[in-house]
Structures are given as C-alpha cells and as structure tokens.
C-alpha cells in the first residue's frame, strides 16, 4: 500500500525538449521527454501514468496531438509533427497518476454496480420500479427475489432486473438511469482528487517553425420520441437524403424512456440491405466505462459480426465509426477508461474496410474546454471529416 505523496505528482513531474535545435521546418518531428516524480520529488521507477500532450498556437487556433510512449521506467516521450509556420508551444497534462489508474481499473472490473439503472414494470392498474443492470452482480443478488433475465436474440447479451413483487418479467416497459454509488476509500478519493487529476505540468517549450453545412436543408420530423434515445429522423427531399439516428441499446444512462425504443446496433445493422447509397455510422463507448472490459468486448464482437455480414452482402456500403473523445475525469468515466475502450474498438475493427473518425486526437488537442459533449467547433470538425468520406471531392 502506497501513501498519497508517493503517487506521481503534476507539481514535480517535468518535461524537456530532446535534442533542441535553433530552428525547425514544417514537417519536422520533435520529441519531448517527460520525467515522472512523486510529491517528495523522487523519480518514479515504473510507468502507467496517463498523460495527454499537444502542440498548439493560440493565435492561429492550431493544434496537433502528441503521441505519448510509456517506457515503463518513470520516463515517457511525447512526439509531435510540426504542421504550421510560426510559434508552436508544448502542453503536457497529467490526467491520472499510475496509482489513480489502478484505482480506476480495480473499480471497473470489480464494481459494475457503481452506476445502476431502473426498470419500470407496468400492469393494467399497477406499476413497480426495480433496480436493473448488465450483470448479475453482488448488489443485485441481495434482493429477496432475483432476477428477471433478458437475453438479446442476436448478440446473446444479458440484462438483469430485480423480479417485481406482483408483475411478471414480461411487464418491463421503461428504462432509465438509477444513480451513482461508487464506494471509494480515503486513499482512492485522494488519488482521484482534482488536485492530482487533469493538471498541466509546469514548463515552457516553444519552438519556431520556418516557412459545407449538413443540417441546412434537412427537415427534422417530429416522431414524438425522446431526444436521448430516439429514433430521430430528418429528410432532404431536394438531395434525396434520409437521416435516421437512435441511441444504442442497454446499458445507457438516460432519463426514463420506453424500452421498445432501445434497439441494439446489431439489430439495426442486420435489418439493413446496404449498398452504394447507404452510409452507416455509429459510436459506442461512453456508457460502458463503468463495466468490466469483457462486457464491452462482447458488445463489439457482436457489432463486428453484423458489420462484416453487411459488407459481405453489400460491399459498397460505407461504414464509419466515431472514436471515443476526451471529457470524463472521474471514477464513472475517466479519460483513461474511455481510452481503454477506444483502443479495444480500433483493434476490433482494424481488419474490416471501415473508416474511423478520430475524435480522440481532435478533442485531446483542441482549444475548447474538455467536455464529454464536445463544443460546437469540434462537432463541426467531426461533421466535416465525416462528409469528406461520404461526399469526397
């Protein structure tokens, strides 16, 4: 057991430019060496810290993502490509110490109930609310009568709810978020405290480098559905475009919505004919940060099979996947947890002919404040990148 002052500290950790030169050119690569230290100024001898790095110019509103490599000995390197002329300033953030990462990892694998959900069961003149979740967990099993079990017919994934006292399991009609109940020790809370999380490292490295709107014609239809679950639909009769959006299936943190509106991605993909006039785009990660990695991998494996089958029957279908983005900073959805899921998603789909819309790099180095729901500027960049594949010039 370590003490809090032995964890990597953003106040004593430093970084330096490797092999500095007097001038650089556009296209050059620069490397920054990060040396991790604890509160006592002792150099760390092991890795696992989670850093984010960017190179930016505030005046130009230009920035580029830095690739951080962990050397597993307390040192890290961040590499950047110089993409513009003028000043370029290095910024390094310690998102989580390696000790905080272990807290996140332990709670992800051992406490999936830290976020719980509510199911509404309804009869003719009676309704009941019960606790639900994606696993037959310890807290769920404490109920006197457990459980209603629901198995997705395609993916085989399971969902569990406390068995209602007076209604059958088939009476489940609505789903919603129940609450947050992480149980952290004093040390866990300290390691994840804002004093040690998402902090910019002190330092000043600056190098000198020598020399369309998709929604404008779409008309949204009022389907009288929830904006959090969908389905939502818009049409553009002039350009013969039909756009349909809906949230992925359980688990999903949302206000109370009809269970029938929560369709799994595999079900939607299996129902598509596909073809040269069809575009499929999806993202799935944020609502899985509180569950063991195996839960997410099972979901991805099912989606991969569905996408592979779609591309076999209709090879001209364009499939795009939006990556994870930065924004979470706590036990329920840290950037480290999101990054783990993002890496898993990329590996799962890397051998299929799909496009990854890399929003992780985009939000990691953008000038707007961190937000799990990115700023308008970021969303516009996402849409522009998306359209560059849908309607290439």
Image (spheres, rainbow, N blue to C red):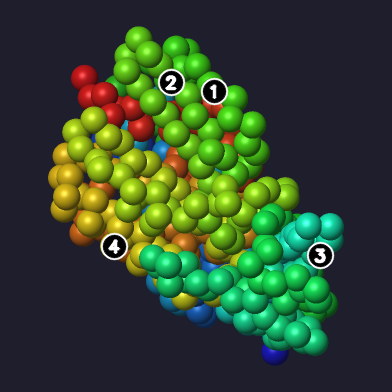
Q: Which residue is mark 3?
A: 128
Image marks 3 and 2: residues in contact by CB distance under 8 Å: no
Marks 3 and 4, how far apart in space?
37 Å
Marks 3 and 2, how far apart in space?
39 Å
- Numbered tag placed on residue 221 in the rendering: 1
| Up/down of 292 relative to 383, above or below | below
Image depth: mark 3 or mark 4 in front = 3
Identified at 70% across, 89% down, the residue is 1
Marks 2 and 4, how far apart in space?
29 Å
- Label 4: which secondary element: helix
Marks 1 and 2, how far apart in space?
8 Å
Q: Which residue is mark 2?
A: 235
User: Can residue 76 be seen by looking at this rendering?
Assistant: no
Image marks 2 and 4: residues in contact by CB distance under 8 Å: no
Identified at 80% across, 73% down, the residue is 166
Q: Is residue 37 left or right of residue 63?
A: right
Marks 4 and 1, how far apart in space?
32 Å
- Numbered tag placed on residue 305 in the rendering: 4
């Amino acid at each position: 057991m370590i003490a809090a002052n032995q964890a990597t500290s953003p106040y004593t950790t430093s970084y330096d430019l490797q092999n500095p030169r007097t001038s650089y050119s556009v296209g050059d690569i620069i490397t920054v060496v990060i040396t991790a230290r604890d509160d006592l100024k002792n150099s760390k001898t092991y890795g696992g810290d989670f850093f984010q790095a960017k190179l930016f110019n505030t005046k130009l509103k230009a920035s580029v993502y830095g690739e951080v490599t962990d050397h597993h000995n307390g040192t890290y390197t961040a590499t950047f490509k110089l993409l513009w002329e003028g000043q370029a300033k290095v910024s390094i953030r310690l998102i989580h110490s390696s000790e905080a990462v272990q807290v996140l990892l332990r709670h992800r694998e051992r406490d999936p109930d830290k976020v719980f959900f509510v199911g509404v069961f309804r009869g003719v003149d009676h309704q009941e609310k019960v606790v639900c979740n994606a696993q037959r967990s310890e807290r769920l099993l404490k109920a006197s009568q457990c459980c209603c079990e629901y198995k997705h017919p395609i993916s085989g994934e399971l969902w569990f709810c406390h068995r209602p006292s007076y209604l059958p399991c088939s009476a489940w009609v609505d789903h919603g978020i129940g609450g947050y109940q992480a149980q952290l020790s004093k040390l866990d809370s300290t390691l994840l405290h804002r004093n040690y999380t998402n902090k910019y490292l002190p330092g000043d490295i600056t190098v000198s480098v020598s020399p369309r709107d998709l929604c404008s014609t779409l008309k949204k239809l009022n389907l009288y559905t929830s904006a959090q679950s969908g389905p939502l639909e818009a049409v553009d009769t002039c350009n013969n475009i039909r756009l349909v959006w809906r949230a992925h299936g359980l688990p999903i943190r949302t206000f109370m919505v009809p269970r029938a509106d929560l369709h799994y991605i595999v079900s939607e993909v299996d129902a598509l004919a596909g073809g040269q006039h069809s575009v499929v785009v999806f993202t799935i990660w944020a609502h899985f940060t509180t569950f063991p990695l195996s839960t997410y991998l099972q979901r991805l494996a099912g989606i991969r099979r569905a996408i592979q089958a779609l591309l076999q029957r209709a090879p001209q279908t364009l499939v795009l996947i939006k990556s994870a983005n930065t924004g979470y900073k706590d036990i329920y959805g840290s950037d480290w947890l999101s990054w783990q899921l993002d890496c898993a998603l990329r590996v799962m789909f890397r051998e299929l002919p799909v496009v990854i819309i890399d929003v992780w790099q985009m939000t990691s180095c953008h000038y707007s404040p961190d937000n799990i729901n990115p700023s308008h500027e970021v969303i516009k960049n996402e849409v522009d990148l998306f359209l560059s594949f849908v309607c290439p010039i």
